[in-house]
Amino acid sequence: MTGEPLAQSEISYTPNASEPLLAVPVEPQPAPPLLLLPEHAEGYRSSLQYLSGVATLTLLFFASASFTVAYLSPGGKIASAASQKAAAATAENFFDSISLLAEGAYVLDLTTNRVLYSKNASAQLPLASLTKVPLVLAASEGLDSGADITIPPHTPPDGAGIRLPAGLRFTAQDLIGFTLAASSNEGAAILAEAAEDALRIKYPLATPGSAVLWRMNDIAKNLGLSDMVFLNTHGLDQSDTRAGAFGSAHDVAALFAYASQTAPATFGQTSRNTIKIRAATGETVTATNTDEALPAIPGLIMGKTGYTALAGGNLAIVFEVGPARPIVAVILRSTKDGRFEDMKKIVAATVAAISAGQ
């Protein structure tokens, strides 16, 4: 396998005193559909109480120039397109001065379902380690969170040294948390192998030997993410000219929104600066979160980095601006360091827009 490996954090192993089969998935037959993203309160309607007389018309003229009275209707339907368009334009003003290195970007307010910022959001770009989010969604279906996974003899798919020694036993939840936070290709391969048999039983139509990869693509299909496809379970480049996964900023935002809502405890581990997992026999493995923008992101719910030679620098997050106001933001094909600066700009503009009442 060629292509620059994904960035991984410094990981230390403290002793106690086969890459999975990859295949381009065949077109699957329909599997049990997943629940799609829940509908949020999404609209405003405005009403103006008209009075009679010239004086009233004058008052209305000045009032309409200064503010719009809006509130949610019982059905959450948009009653005034003009007021919504005006609100969106105001929010966009906070992003006017932003200049990003990223080729693709997308920011969505999950409470109002309103797009705050978009740049080439439908362009299909390499995903790199963002692939580990659908990997965890798929593998979790075949692994009980408290079940022990014994690390098998293996060779990390990126050619790096072994950091999870064979023979140690970790809970599935710990191994998942480590893999996400450390962006570990080694951990991704081990999770895919551990979940393979259970998913093959659960989904008989899955590609033999690649049930986890099949399910990853099936999840994307069921969510309606037409620009998203996975060719392997970790996101490493397949070759110098072929990436391991593709998707648009729009589709990545939908996937991350779904993941944060359906498995908050699992993906919440990605908000931690460091993570330490302990084997059943006492050995520990520690890693630092690969998201260098972490200190600048308020209310982080989940996040995932990605980097390969073909993908460049990727970063996607879900964070809260104020109580119960989740935002999903995606940066695709920036640079290795530029993705963090790009995200800081996005976060600052989003906070400003929401603070201004958008």
Image (cartoon, rainbow, N blue to C red):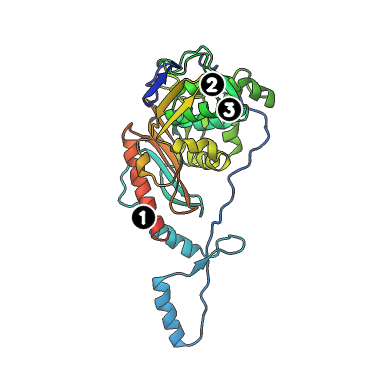
In depth, the one of 16 and 105 nearer the eye is: 16
Nearer the viewer's eye, disc 1 or disc 2? 2
Left or right of 295, for residue 36? right
Left or right of 147, for residue 328? left
- Label 3 to label 1: alpha-carbon separation: 38 Å
- Label 1 to label 2: alpha-carbon separation: 47 Å
Q: Mark on residue 227?
A: none
Label 3 vs 1, first from the N-terminus? 3
In the image, residue 324 lies at what x, y percent? Answer: 50, 52
Q: Which residue is mark 2?
A: 280
Q: Are marks 3 and 1 in contact (CB under 8 Å)?
A: no
Q: Residue at x 47, y 30 (%)?
A: 180
Label 1 vs 2, first from the N-terminus? 2
Counting labels gives: 3
Q: Mark on residue 139?
A: 3
Please tell me whether mark 3 sits on a helix, a strand or a loop.
Answer: helix
Q: Which residue is mark 1?
A: 352
Label 3 vs 2, first from the N-terminus? 3
Please tell me whether mark 1 sits on a helix, a strand or a loop.
Answer: helix
In the image, residue 354 lies at what x, y percent? Answer: 41, 56
Q: Residue at x 55, y 61 (%)?
A: 78
> What is the three-letter code of the residue carrying label 1?
Ala
- Label 3 to label 2: alpha-carbon separation: 21 Å
> What is the three-letter code of the residue carrying label 2?
Ala
Q: Is residue 27 above or below residue 20?
A: below
Q: Quadrant of the N terminus?
A: top left
In depth, the one of 284 and 226 nearer the eye is: 284
